Each structure stands twice: as structure tokens, then as C-alpha cells.
Amino acid sequence: MTVNEVIEGLQKLIPLAQAEDFDNVGLLCGNPSREVTGILVCHDVLENVVDEAITKNLNLIVTFHPIIFSGLKSITGKNYVEKTVLKAIENKIAIYAIHTAFDNDYFGVNYKICEKLGLLSQKILIPSAHKLQILQLYVPPENASEVKNALFKAGAGNIGFYEECSFTIPGKGSFKPKPGADLYEGEINKCEHTDELVLSVVFEDYKKNSIVKAMKNAHPYEEVAYQIIKIENENQYLGLGRFGELSEKMDENTFLEFVKKTFNLKIIRHSNFTGKKIKRVGVLGGSGASGLSAALSAGCDAYLTGDLKYHDFFRSEGKILLCDIGHFESEQFVTEHLVEILSQKFTTFAISKSTEKTNPVNYFL
């Protein structure tokens, strides 16, 4: 398989369109036409990780964090970013970043954290908003199945764990063809009335172009009557963070010991104890101060994340136990999870989990 073929397969599982707008995901460097000798999965791609790929003869690195985040004006090796990219290019190694596309994925970063904690009845903490649209079109009854199937094949009607979802309403359409029209039915300059169905399907906004194209290709009319409506509904299967329930309540000390053991932590920075038992837990891997309000609104007793600042801890206000377990530590299961996903999808070449240390934070105890 080529690099591009691997990327196309991976995007069917974790679409890059799920990523946040500020992010820099996708193929960062490398020839998409080059044949893949193997994949190395890492949390951060640094120079030592590229060296590991060279040693193992793996020419595609799938990294969680993108090594190139802002624009590069030169690649001369003057800093750690340029050194990494330069070595990868010189050794014909492609780098593909997945970052917030995997953060937002229903079975992504935060799903794995909740799985490690054994949380039940999980839900998305911050569901994505303004990402859903409705396509409403008019179609002859005899063509409805063909058009619906084309829309479904293009990705319309997929909602969470359901697919091929649609709704139809029967009605009467009218039209008067003018000279030059390529008629499906009727006569020029004669007002016509015909049976039609109003067909509606929900879709994620990034699928719009392919869905409209599929509709026009499958529809019998020369001019398809349709409208696309943006809806306010949140996507409950896409978004940042997650929350769920522990199987049994824990006091705060016991909970912190449980987290420390589960994540193999040296230290946990936490807010003042609330005096409440811990049952509902919110998580957001990485820098998650932005999810605190959502965790409070969801009624979480504790919230696990990384990179909380001094004043963030005041925001607990005796209502929630805030736990800063570290940025890397909160995302530490990412590479393991990606290796599992890639191994199931691609079985014809080696997929290796990086053994190199890339966490830049050290602790003196």
C-alpha cells in the first residue's frame, strides 16, 4: 500500500474533518505515492522517534501531536521541529498527525481514558455544535429508493450507532417547463402536477459536497429541487471530553489512590476536597481547563485533565474535585489505542508502538 492508501483507510475510521479548526492534522511531510514499509505510532514525533523509524525500516510515522503546528519559513535544523522534519524528509519518512480528530472521536482519546477508569453510562462532555445539517429534496416515488441509497452510500443518514436514517412525506409538485428544458416528464409550456416525495436526511457538514454530488448523479430531474438546512442540534457522538459513572462510590482519598494507580502517576495536583463521595467522573485528555464548566453542568463529582493553572483550581468552589494528572499522563494510552486500531485495519505490514521517551516534563522527587 502507498502512504496515501493508508491515509485514506485511516480517515474512514477517524476523519480529519473531526479536528478542531486551529489544529494542523494530516500528512505533514512525505511523498503520498511512496509504498509503505511499515508504520511507527508515537505520541510526539521528535528526532529520536525518526531515528527509531529508520532503525526499524518503517517509513510512515503516525503521531498524535503534530510536530508542525505553525508555519515554517525554513527547514535548516535550527530547532527541534526543523531537525525532526529535516531528518524525516532526508530519510524519505512520511509523518501523519491525528491530534484533535482523535480527541473528538467517539471511540478516541477520552473513550480510552474512561475505559481504563471503568466508567459506565458514558457520554460526550462537550458535544460538537453546528456540525449537523439536513438535506431536504423532492423526488418521484419510483426513484426514491435509488436516490436514498446513493445518499446513504455518500454518508448521509448516519447518526451515532444508526445508519440509513431518513424521513419521507408524500405530496404534489407542480412545474411548467420552458423551451430548452431536458424533460423527465411533462410538456413544454404546459403546467404539470405530479406525485413527489419530500425526502430528508441528516448529515455531518464535512460530507456536504460528496452528498450533493451523489444526489445530483442519482436524481432523474435535470434541475433537482433541494435545500440544505443548518441545525442547532449538538452531535452527541462527536466532541471533546467524556463523563461516566464509577461502579461504586469512592471517598476522595480512595479515588485519588485509584487514579494514581491506574495512570501510574508520581503526583496528582488537585483542588480542595469537597467532602462528597465520587461517583460521576469527567475526563478530558490534554489541556482541559476549558471543560471545567461542562463537567460542573454535567454534575461530575471529579474532573480529570492536564495543564490546569493556579486560578483554575479556585473554580472548583467546593462543588467538584479537580485533578491535574499531567498533559502527557492524561493522554498516555493514545499510542496503545492507535496501534490497536491500525493493526485491525492494516494487516499486511508491520505496525510498531514507539518505545522512545517524548514527554518533555520530568519530576524531581
Image (spheres, rainbow, N blue to C red):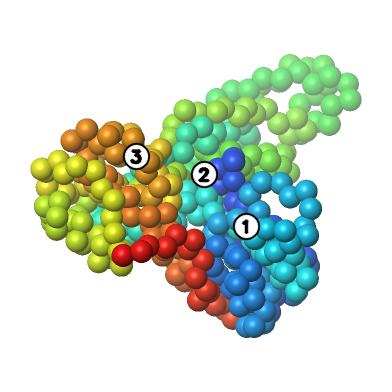
Disc 3 crowd rating (10 Å Cα; few below 14, some 14-19, many 20+) is few
Q: Is residue 134 above or below residue 244?
A: above
Q: Position of residue 160 (x, y in %)?
A: 43, 48
Residue picked out by circle 2: 157
Which numbered circle lies on residue 67? 1
The CA span between labels 2 and 1 is: 36 Å
Q: Which residue does the numbered mark 3 point to in the structure image?
A: 310
| Element assignment for label 1 | loop
Q: Say whether residue 113 is left or right of residue 103.
A: left
Residue shown at 47% from the left, 51% from the top: 103
Q: Farthest residue to the front: give it.
A: 364
The residue lying at 55 percent from left, 28 percent from top is 230
Residue 292 appears anywhere in the view: no
Q: CA distance from mark 1 to mark 3?
A: 28 Å
- Residue flagged by tag 3: what amino acid is it? Tyr
Residues packed near mark 1 inside 10 Å, few (<14), some (14 to 19) or many (20 plus): many
